[in-house]
Image: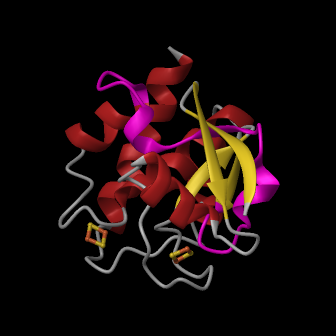
Amino acid sequence: MKSINLKVNGTAHPVQVADDELLLDALRQRVGVTSAREGCGVGACGACTVLADGKSVSSCLANAARYDDAELTTADGLPTDDVVVTAFVESNAMQCGYCIPGFVMMTKELLAENPNPSDTEIAEHLEGNICRCGTYPELIKAVRLAASRSRA
Ligand code: FES
Ligand code: FES
């Protein structure tokens, strides 16, 4: 076991993790994060996406100990009036909702890097995220809305 500090949404969580513990498991089981979810477990669906120092990470593939002291952001740490969260809600960009936290975190990353993405750039940035409910048209609409509001 290793002692590490998981900094999640601005709060420090001193935890002990196994040498091979995945970041997804540490976040869910030791910190109580619910928005990072296991879909495929092999880095192919995006449901487990969190941001580490602003960059998206598939937490189902990431070793927890490597994120000692990183600034981790998860979707459940975003305020309810967050521009991306509200755009997703208003665009009805969800059905079952399982995939949505991953899409939200990818959108946060995209807009931080590119405040005015084209539809092609949106699609390219989100191409690693899978929505089994097929809510893609609403998801794209939500990202466009969040981008326009962020620029306003
Ligand atoms: S659960 Fe991590 S990418 Fe699918
Ligand atoms: S809303 Fe159900 S998997 Fe995306």
Q: Position of residue 32 (x, y in %)?
A: 39, 48
Please give the name of the residue rendered at 24% of the width and 45% of the height, measured from the top-left corner: 91
Res 118 seen here:
no
- In the image, residue 70 lies in the stretch drawn in magenta: yes
Q: Quadrant of the N terminus?
A: bottom right
Residue farthest right in this picture: 66
- Looking at the rendering, the stretch of residues picked out in magenta corresponds to 58-83
From the viewer's side, name the closer residue of 57 and 111: 57
In the rendered image, the vertical position of residue 5 relative to residue 130, given as above or below: above
In the image: residue 8, left or right of residue 34: right
> Would you identify the image quadrant in which residue 24 lies?
bottom right
> Seen in the image, is 139 located left or right of residue 133?
right
Residue 62 x %, y %: 71, 67
Q: Is residue 14 above or below residue 26?
A: above
Q: Residue at x 59, y 72 (%)?
A: 60
Q: Give 125 or 141, whichever is nearer the viewer.
A: 125
Q: In the image as oriented, which residue stretches furthest toward the top?
A: 152
Is residue 134 placed above or below 31 in the rendered structure?
Answer: below
Ligand 1 location (quadrant): bottom right
Residue occupying image coordinates x 31% and y 43%: 88
Whether residue 29 appears in this view of the structure is: yes
Measured as percent of width and height from the top left, residue 55 is found at 73, 47
Instruction: Tell me the residue at 32%/80% (across/down).
Output: 132
Which residue reaches farthest front? 1
